[in-house]
Amino acid sequence: METKFNIIKIKEFAREIKTPESTIRTWKRRGEIPENCFLVIGSTVFVKVEEIQQWIKKTVWKGGGTNDRQISRE
């Protein structure tokens, strides 16, 4: 059975949105990005792609629109 996880490393997410990784980690620590958008395995932090996209649409883009884009999952 093949399972595909929709997660990317926080480093990849930061690169995708052109924001320093340290800024993403600060937003996470302050609770500015909800905890349910992250998955921690050991010491590695992953971003849950679908959750972060929903949060971005709801919070940043107020429901999407012309700025709507997908985060790539290579």
Image (cartoon, rainbow, N blue to C red):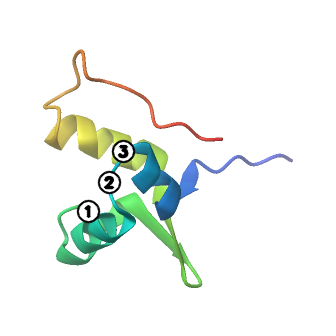
Q: Residue at x 26, y 45 (%)?
A: 55
Tell me: 30 left or right of 70: left
Q: Disc 2 marks which residue?
A: 19
Q: Quadrant of the C terminus?
A: top right
Mark 1: amino acid: Pro
- The answer to whether the residue labelled 2 contacts the one labelled 3, judged by CB atoms less than 8 Å apart, is yes
Relative to 63, say whether 7 is above or below.
below
Residues 23 and 8: in front is 23
Mark 2: amino acid: Thr
Which of labels 1 and 3 is toward the front? 3
Quarter of the rendering containing residue 63: top left
Dot 1: few (<14), some (14–19), or many (≥20) neighbours within 10 Å?
some
| Whole-number angstrom distance, CA of label 1 to CA of label 3 | 17 Å
In the rendered image, the residue lying farthest to the top is 66
Q: Disc 3 marks which residue?
A: 17
Q: Disc 1 marks which residue?
A: 34
Secondary structure of residue under mark 2: loop
Q: Position of residue 73 (x, y in %)?
A: 59, 41
Mark 3: amino acid: Ile
